[in-house]
Amino acid sequence: MIDPLVLLAFVPAALALNLTPGADMMFCLGQGLRGGPRVALAADAGIAVAVLGHVTLAGLGLGAAVAAMPWLFDTIRWIGVTYLGWLAFATLRGGHAAQQDLGTMRPSRAFRQGFVVNLTNPKVILFVLAFLPQFTDAARPVLPQFLALGAVLSLGGLIVNGAVGVFAGGVGRRLAGSAAFNRWLGRVSASIFAGLALRLALLNKA
């Protein structure tokens, strides 16, 4: 479906994007610190599935609709801002929230959080709509090409963000017995989520 030479050019471009620190990487970092490696990998998987969702929506033309209707972009964006703000508040709630998360946070919950955080970022679908057409053949069906390229992009993110999350989770596990670290951990994790919310709030379509 995709020319091998085009795919050969796409893989390093996608990998370079995956290696660039961004919202997904920071979210996996925060989840790893809060819940450990398994939770980080679950959040990473949720993000990867959401990326494929964005790719599918872009291939179906929703990206053009979002670009054409600012209110739709803003609605999705503010849902994401609200959700990230709620995560920041929930992380700070209670003096030992971070320590409790290390023992009780379920991977299924982290998966849902990663999925929602990525899916409510309309900038992703606009990015996909701008980036993937450079590697597609207009003479062939667009959606299958988008899905194939999106799978490569999603897999790269799964590996890179997962590695970051597992590393952070290992650090969190080793230092979980320190009360001072747990206080610091709660503040850092909440700051990551609050920072992502602020970043999303300040986004525009330019």
Image (cartoon, rainbow, N blue to C red):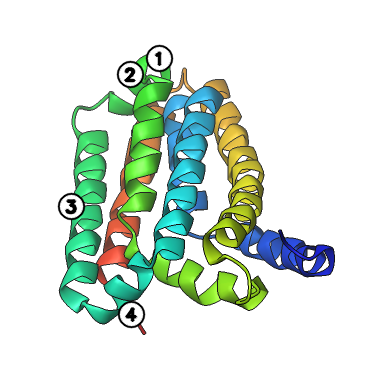
Disc nearer the start of the sequence (3/4):
3
Query: Of 198 and 150, which appears nearest the observer?
Result: 150
Instruction: Check disc 2 and give the amino acid type.
Output: Gln
Q: Residues within 10 Å of mark 1 (few under 14, many from 20)?
A: few
Looking at the rendered structure, the secondary structure element under dot 1 is: helix
Observer able to see residue 137? yes
Bin the neighbour count of mark 2 within 10 Å (Cα to Cα): few under 14, some 14-19, many 20 and up: some
Depth check: 165 or 128 in front? 128
Q: Which residue is mark 2?
A: 100
Q: Look at label 3 and name its amino acid.
A: Thr
Q: Quadrant of the C terminus?
A: bottom left
Toward the viewer: 134 or 71?
134
CB atoms at circles 1 and 2 under 8 Å apart? yes
Label 4 CA crowd tier, 10 Å (few <14, some 14–19, many 20+): few
Local packing at callout 3 (Cα closer than 10 Å; few below 14, some 14-19, many 20+) is some
Mark 3 or 4, closer to the camera: 4
Please say if the residues under marks 4 and 1 sit with CB atoms less than 8 Å apart.
no
User: Mark 3 or mark 1, which is nearer the start of the sequence?
Assistant: 3
In the displayed structure image, the side of residue 105 where residue 133 appears, left or right: right
- In the rendered image, which residue does mark 4 sit on? 205
Check disc 1 and give the amino acid type. Answer: Gly
